[in-house]
Image (spheres, rainbow, N blue to C red):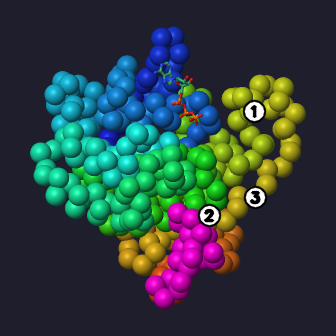
Amino acid sequence: MGVEIAVTGLTKTFGSQTIWRDVTLTLPAGEISVMLGPSGTGKSVFLKTLVGLLKPDRGSIVIDGKDLTRLREHDLYEVRKLFGVLFQDGALFGSMTLFDNVAFPLREHTKKTEAEIARIVHEKMELVGLEGAEKKLPGEISGGMRKRAGLARALVLDPEILLIDEPDSGLDPVRTSYINQLFVDLNAQIEATFLIVTHDINTARTVPDNIGLLYHRHLAMFGPREMLLSSEEPVVRQFLNAQTIGPIGMSEEKDADELAAESGRELPPLPPIPPQLGTSDGRPRRGERPAGEWCREHGVTPPPGSFQTAGALTPPRQTEYAAELATAAAPGPAGGPVGAVGEVD
Ligand SMILES: Nc1ncnc2c1ncn2[C@@H]1O[C@H](COP(=O)(O)OP(=O)(O)OP(=O)(O)O)[C@@H](O)[C@H]1O
């Protein structure tokens, strides 16, 4: 499961506005990639272009040997079935129950019986931790639950590719941790290719196998997590470490005066690379690589303290933790009284 997406020379404009040009990257099959970038750099436009909702001006998007940008509407419709998309707000129909929302793609795109649909809906609702909430309306549940319902809907057609737009928007840090854990566990289970657009630096630093950064109308960098987290490239370094010193300004690029004022100021050292978030039951994911492997293979010395942050869940600790969770009354990656969808009883 999971297919590679090879993007080459992709350019998108709206009238005279160039959103990004010459974007080239490969999303490896079955791996989790994250796309970052300051607001307005075209991350959502990139997702919509990948799924064929927007047409690029130039370039190709090759999946399974087919270039999406050259397909006729009927063939594009077929390729789109490979995708599941989770939009920012879950994009649920407000007047439908969660059950009907999740069942919607099955009723629209398949000839399955209502009994089969019910089985699949229950299975996916359980997968995202929403069993029992089928009869609720979107307006009656929290933002985190709406995202989970949107995720269940994105999963009903068993996608090979999951595109996720800002899953953490509007969520508190605990719910963000839960949804991140859910993505990692889900990736291990369904092995689809994930692309997550996020502004959350902690998510970007700990969840993905690969990170991309869109900036100033181009792709500044795309590659394995360790490559970007150890990078000294000014834009990458500034963004991934949420610093004010660097080329990125308040609105977009800093002007020459602002940069001159900064020259000579010493950059803070790169923080340690945190361990990657593992699955909650310790099972390895297809895209997972041993900590430090990329740095070792490329002769890069990671910042001191990397991969061993105190209190972090390194894989053996995670297995231990999963066992604790199985017996504890209050499950969740953060432990404590806050559950995935509300307070734990
Ligand atoms: N259909 C459209 N027609 C014209 N311009 C558009 C369209 N969709 C997006 N844009 C423009 O493209 C630019 C990038 O928008 P996009 O929403 O992709 O940015 P983003 O990086 O996802 O931002 P944010 O992080 O704030 O969500 C914006 O200037 C936006 O106004």
Overall secondary structure of the magenta stretch?
loop
Q: CA distance from mark 1 to mark 3?
A: 22 Å
Q: Is residue 327 found inside the magenta-colored segment of the image?
A: yes
Q: Which residue is mark 1?
A: 250
Q: Callout 2: few (<14), some (14-19), or many (20+) C-alpha neighbours within 10 Å?
A: some
The residue singled out by tag 3 in the image is 269
59 over 284 or under it: above or below: above
Magenta range is: 325-345
Query: Looking at the image, which residue is at 75% across and 47% down?
Result: 243
Residue 95 location, x and y as percent? 41, 40
Q: Which residue is pictured at 67% across the width and 43% down the height?
A: 234
Q: SS for tag 2?
A: helix
Badge 1 marks a residue whose secondary structure is loop
Tell me if residue 290 can be seen.
Answer: no
- Secondary structure at badge 3 equals loop
Q: Are marks 1 and 3 in contact (CB under 8 Å)?
A: no
Q: Amino acid at mark 1?
A: Met
Q: Of residues 241 and 186, which is closer to you in this image?
A: 186
In the rendered image of this protein, does residue 120 appear above or below residue 72?
Answer: below
Q: Mark 1, mark 3: which one is toward the viewer?
A: 1
In this view, the residue in front, 14 or 23, is 14
Identify which amino acid the numbered label 2 is placed on: Val
Which of pointers 1 and 2 indicates the residue nearer the eye? 2
Give me the disc on residue 154. none
Q: Quadrant of the C terminus?
A: bottom right
Where is mark 2, residue-wise? 174
Relative image position of residue 43 (x, y in whole percent): 50, 36
Q: Earlier in the sequence, mark 2 or mark 3?
A: 2
Residue at position x 62%, y 34% from top?
39
